[in-house]
Image (tube, grey):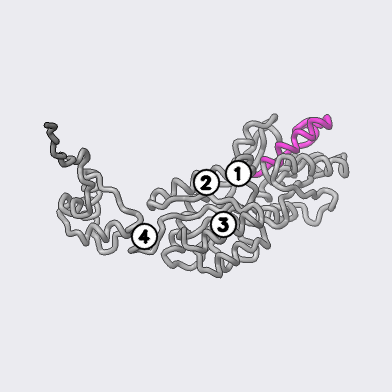
Amino acid sequence: MMSVSKPTRRTRSAKTRPTINDVAAAAGVSRGTVSRALNGGHNVSRAAQEAIARAIRKTGYVVNQHARSLVTQRSQSVAFILSEPQDRLFEDPNFSILLRGCTQALAEYDITLLLTIAGDSDDRRRVSRYVTAGHVDGALLVSTHAGNPLIDELLSRDVPVVACGRPLGYERSVAYVAADDRDGARQMVTYLKALGRKRIGIVAGPADTPGGVDRLAGYHDVLGPSDPALVEMGDYTEEGGAAAMARLLERVPDLDAVFVASDLMASGALTVLRQAGRRVPEDVAVGGFDDSSIALSTVPRLTTVRQPLSRISVEMVRLLVDRIEGAEPSAVILPTELVIRESA
């Protein structure tokens, strides 16, 4: 006769997941104190916060973000919205620096950064739907062009936003952090003029961007209403800088200096000058803007204007956290610095 063995009860192979009660017991405080510490630290002493932090490390407790969001009505995430085509994220080193800096700064607040691309109207609509549906607590706007309806859409739904650069037309309603583009341009053009250069041209950025507007204004601050033939527009890409430089050189063959309003465009401009047989800086002095990694890889190395992108990232995050907490929009303008190398 076949015998049948009784099933045995399965034993747990893993320890029970630590709870908030375990943290409270280890820290010697109440469960309510731990809860307040995890949700902003209101009415929790520094000593209690430190004890709770030690208890969390000791017990291995992990915050249940879903449950936490139900209580706080916060997602603990924000969107980084780049209003450029996707390939620009990898082409322009400024964007990766801002992305990395914002990610690191947000980590100090235990907030996750979500990268979104709004380079065309379809992308913008998708991003707008996602952000305004409450999936994030706020948004960092990068390279937003004038006339982009995204700002209006976010403001109409009371989404906290902070812009990188002066938000043209929204300076009173949108918090922003910007480098002093106009003064940086003044520094560069003043320097080129002091070198004794007489025919100083500019490859400016797009007229629907704050850098395009303010850097061109700084150029005119130094040279006044100069010859319109000396002004050419670019698009902040290497190819656009090359094309603009070619047009400028064709119109002004006696050009002896050029201020190019981004390092990426300046790289393209240097290629065109080299192909035209113009020596840099002997025949044409070249100045850029940004002090990105590109400035060190060009031949010759690029004289440029440094904008403090790492600090801009930190300030953007600080202002956004303030906006999420209900603060009014404010602005931070950071100084730029002339960096002299071999191109001028």
Seen from the viewer's position, the closer of residues 84 and 302 is 84
Mark before the other along the chain sequence, 1 or 4 = 4
Q: Residue 190 shows which numbered tag?
A: none
Q: Position of residue 67 (x, y in %)?
A: 32, 58
Residue with the mark numbered 1: 89
In the image, residue 246 above or below residue 223 = above
Label 4 sits on what residue type? Ser
Q: Residue 127 shows which numbered tag?
A: 3
Q: Residue at coordinates 18% horizontally, 51% vertically from top-left?
A: 22
The quadrant of the picture occupied by the C terminus is top right
Q: CA distance from mark 2 to mark 3?
A: 17 Å
Residue with the mark numbered 2: 99
Residue with the mark numbered 4: 69
Q: Seen in the image, is 192 located left or right of residue 246?
A: left
Label 1 sits on what residue type? Leu
For mark 3, does the 10 Å Cα neighbourhood hold few (<14), some (14 to 19), or many (20 or more) residues? some
Asked whether residue 332 appears in the rendered view, the answer is yes
Start-end of magenta stretch: 264-290
The mark closer to the camera, 3 or 1, is 3
